[in-house]
Amino acid sequence: MPPLFYWAFLVLSGVLGLSVGSFANVAAYRVPAGLSVVRPRSACPACGTQIKAVDNVPVVSWLLLKGRCRACGAGISLRYPVVEFGTAVLFVVVALRFGLSPTVFAYWVLVAACVVITAVDLEHYRVPVAVLYPSWALGALGLVVASATEGRWGRLLFALAGAAIGFSVLLALHLISPKGMGFGDVRLAGFLGMFLGWLSLVQVAVGLFFGFALGSVVGIALVVVGARTMRSRLPFAPFLCAGAALAILFGREIVRVWLS
Ligand SMILES: [Zn+2]
């Protein structure tokens, strides 16, 4: 790919990531409340004033408004620009990983879903099916197109196997301890397993391993510093998503270092 074209692709990936991040903020706020993600337009939760398009530019508007509503001056959470910027960074990382190909679309769907699910799970301790199922369908479609383009249909079988493995491993834990492992995490592991399996079954194992490792380390650390007790709940979706991200980006390198 010519360098200029490649740079344009990366910049567009970032801009797309900013807009998807902005939509992810809306979804993370409205889906748990059972509201539509398309209507009405966003409004300030403090004064109810509709937010003008010019004040709704990802990250930039928050900075220009210094994190305050233009109408009433109420504070706008730092979470909004952080989610927008974070999504943009992840979109660019996925673009670097897969290049300009149909594959990049499928993994952008994964990123968008993980951002919303992580935000909702951190706040509400649940994985919303209203986000998971449409993302699953769209991501599967993306992987079918990617397999067709590459002419490697066998990858779809690995995607199916990855989904089955992720789902089964967490289902077993859910059956052993329904309170410790919610069924939302079981579904999520199936969803993530599809994307990891499409790459390779090794990546499914790496993703699950790092999901549990990160969850345990952070869970124990929070108990040690006194932020949580052994009995308090820990949202697990962020760790499963982080494990999947590590496996997608560095899975093969991690296994190579491991074996050597
Ligand atoms: Zn306001």
Image: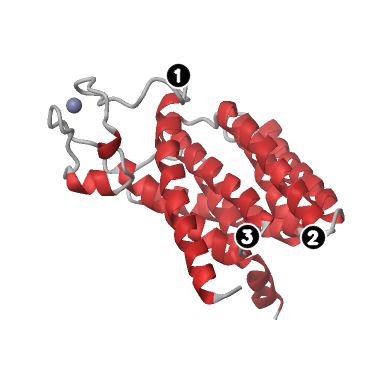
Mark 1: amino acid: Leu
Q: Is mark 1 on a helix, strand or loop?
A: loop
Q: What element carries label 2?
A: helix
1 vs 2, front mark: 2
Label 2 crowd bin: few (<14), some (14–19), many (20+), radius 10 Å: few
Residue at point 84% right, 58% down? 152
Q: Looking at the image, which is closer to me, 93 or 186?
A: 93
**Residue occupied by mark 1:** 35
**Residue occupied by mark 2:** 150
Q: Position of residue 98 (x, y in %)?
A: 63, 63
Please tell me which of labels 3 and 1 falls first in the chain: 1
3 vs 1, front mark: 1
In this view, 100 is above or below 135? below
Mark 3: amino acid: Ile
**Residue occupied by mark 3:** 248
User: Within the displayed image, which quadrant is ligand 1 positioned in?
Assistant: top left
Q: In which quarter of the image is residue 237?
A: top right
Q: In which quarter of the image is the N terminus?
A: bottom right
